[in-house]
Image (spheres, rainbow, N blue to C red):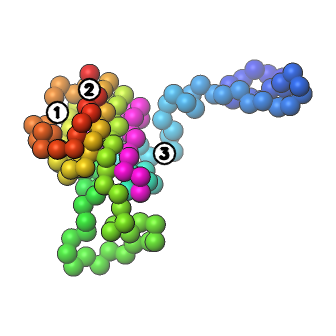
Amino acid sequence: MSSSRGASRKSPAGSTRLKPNANFFNSPSQSDGVGKEGTVPESLLKEARKTGSLNLSNRGISVIPPKLWRLNIDPPDGSTASFDVDERWWDQVELTRLDLSSNEIKEISEDIENFNSLSALEVQYNELRCLPNNVIKLDKLSKIFAR
């Protein structure tokens, strides 16, 4: 049997065991929609609205899309937006953890102040020189991981 990455091989007991592909664990998927231009799949944003946690680490992002900073902002008054049962804005959870580590981000928007429930911010291993001044307004922010 060939020893190519991701190929299966027989274990001593005769059952098939999969050999992990190193690229699967260490690089962003081409189909996940996250890229240098700052696109984030809606599925990740929906999950963040449910859990309060958004992990965008190690995805090669250099620009954070503006819609990320509006993640927990209610629709404007008079909005006729329709929502599926699993994406009702009134049931969403405030973002408490944001992991942007190990990317190519050079700047964090001052719109980070929209995340007033944020308690943990991970921005280490990026190209940041500083954080926006208004990060001090985030009263619940107790952990910042930066390097």
Q: In this rendering, would 75 be left or right of 34? A: left
Q: In this rendering, would 82 be left or right of 70? A: right
Q: Residue at x 69, y 29 (%)?
A: 6
Give the label, 3 or 1, closer to the camera.
1
Indicate the amino acid at tag 1.
Leu
Whether residue 61 appears in magenta in the rendering, the answer is yes
Q: Is residue 10 above or below residue 80?
A: above
Segment tinted magenta in the rendering: 50-65
Tell me which corner region of the image, top left, top right, bottom left or bottom right, holds residue 1: top right
Indicate the amino acid at tag 3.
Asp
Of labels 2 and 1, earlier in sequence is 1
Of labels 3 and 1, earlier in sequence is 3
Q: Residue at x 49, y 30 (%)?
A: 27
Indicate the amino acid at tag 2.
Ala
Secondary element at image label 2: loop
Tell me if label 2 and label 1 are in contact, CB under 8 Å: yes
Of labels 3 and 2, earlier in sequence is 3
Please tell me how crowded label 3 is: few (under 14), some (14-19), or many (20+) other residues with Cα within 10 Å.
few
Q: Residue at x 12, y 39 (%)?
A: 136
Q: Position of residue 106 (x, y in %)?
A: 23, 31
User: In this view, which residue lies farthest toward the right?
Assistant: 14
Tell me which corner region of the image, top left, top right, bottom left or bottom right, holds residue 135: top left
* Visible residue check, residue 37: no
Please tell me how crowded label 2 is: few (under 14), some (14-19), or many (20+) other residues with Cα within 10 Å.
some
| Labelled disc at residue 146 | 2
Q: In this rendering, would 50 be left or right of 117? A: right
Find disc 3 in the rendering and name its residue: 32
Whether residue 139 appears in magenta in the rendering, the answer is no
| Labelled disc at residue 131 | 1
Q: Is residue 108 above or below residue 104?
A: below
Most foreground residue, 99 or 5: 99
Q: Position of residue 2 (x, y in %)?
A: 79, 22
